[in-house]
Image (tube, rainbow, N blue to C red):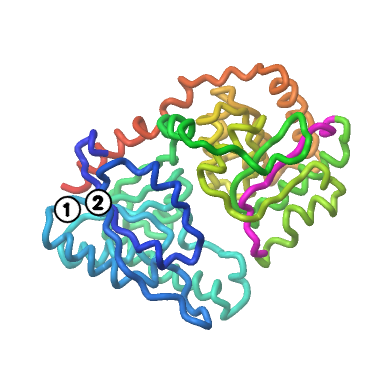
Amino acid sequence: MPQLGWAPVVLTVHEKYYEEKTDEELLAFIPQGQRIEKVNAFGVTRPRLIGDVGLRGFFQLLKKASQIVRQEKIDFIHIFVPSFYLALIGKIIFIRFGIRYGIDYIDPWVHVFPGSENVFSRHWFSTKIARILEPWSVSDASLLSGVSSAYFTPVLRRNPHLEGKVKTFAMPYGWDKTEAEMLNRINKSAYLFHREAKIKLVYAGAYLPKSEQLLKSLFKVIAAHPDLFSNICFYFIGTGKSKSASIQSSIADLAVQYGVSNHVIEHPERLSYVDVLLHVRESDGLFILGSTESHYTPSKFFNAILMKKPVFALLHKDSSINGVIRSSDWGSVVEWEEELTPELFCKNIQTQFQEWKIKTLNSRWSFKEEQVNPLAVDQLLKPLADLLSTVQQ
């Protein structure tokens, strides 16, 4: 961003208030000289009433943001949600100081969270509160953005008065070529690959509630075609320990249920980003388990680009990344849609995995970098920087 005329100031909660284990290795990826302002937050009470770190640090963040705006010339405030409550800070700063702001939707805010169906539960309240707070938060926003338009288009439908008033911008996370260079300087190796398997596929990320249907289909195919998967092992990393009411079984449990545990290893604990990249680098391919929701855009695809590994993906037919994977010949996508029968979806998985396996064993993926270069971070940020220059005026 400095090369594009912007000097970002990052305002965040100090990591000592996080409940999650921190990933110190990520500090190596922060540009030298980047200014970062950290504030305190209220601690987690026992019993645990409020966990959201954005909510626990809300007043401190608002106070610090106000102080910076008073003392310096700030042209624009870009807020990334979740934490969703931080969107309120943009509106408040706009009212007080007239500084324009934008909201980037990493996840939808007004959403049926897992467990929302339980009346008076924490998730039920979260859904109700979201429907109240979002309209007020976005009412004076100058920019709505997200990894795909599916993340902010519903916001415009719920708030039709924003049409023509707010700018929108869809930008995936992208990939940064310098990360592969940094990884080569780190003296570490993958440590989860302890089973003999000629072909190892890595899935790194949370196990989403609406992924289960797709995963069950894959396991059915593995069970029905033992010869095709005889030398295949899927490694699920960082899937999470907690079980949502919407998730009936963990991945390991499902593997046992379908009789495919010899082909599945689940490591629920989260690995550092560096360790994830190392495992992808030493794997034979990256597995993407999508969702029955069309807006899901898997950022993990960019790990495959960095490490030059072919992707095997199960994704909704409207996922924005499908065309990129195909046009770049960076792997195979099996598309799921509501109208598709379970039998046909399983058949498609079998057929396309067979083709994926042959191309992988014979190193026949072309990896057309010219097709993915537009998704490099330095390319993606140029139109964003231009847009910010117009909306802050």
Asked if residue 375 shows in the view, the reply is: no
Magenta-drawn stretch contains 76: no
Q: What residue would you read off at disc 1?
A: 74
Say how many tags the image has.
2
Q: Three-letter amino acid code at disc 2?
A: Val
Name which quarter of the figure residue 380 lies in. top left
Residue 238 lies left or right of residue 104; in this view the side is: right
Image: magenta residue range? 228-243
Asked if residue 270 shows in the view, the reply is: yes
For the residues labelled 1 and 2, say whether their Cβ atoms are less than 8 Å apart. Answer: yes
- Residue 149 vs 84, above or below: the answer is above
> x, y percentage for residue 381?
32, 36
Q: Residues within 10 Å of mark 1 (few under 14, many from 20)?
A: some
Query: Which mark identifies residue 374?
Result: none
Of pointers 1 and 2, the one earlier in the residue sequence: 2
Residue 200 lies left or right of residue 307; in this view the side is: right
Query: Which mark identifies residue 9?
Result: 2
Q: Residues within 10 Å of mark 2 (few under 14, many from 20)?
A: few
Q: Nearer the viewer, residue 227 or 90?
A: 227
Q: Three-letter amino acid code at disc 1?
A: Ile
Residue 27 lies left or right of residue 167; in this view the side is: right
Name which quarter of the figure residue 133 lies in. bottom left
- Magenta stretch, main secondary structure class: loop
- Residue 160 vs 298, above or below: the answer is below
- Residue 363 vs 234, above or below: the answer is above
Which residue is depicted at the point 62% across and 42% down? 316
Which residue is depicted at the point 36% across and 43% down? 169
Which residue is depicted at the point 55% across and 72% down? 123
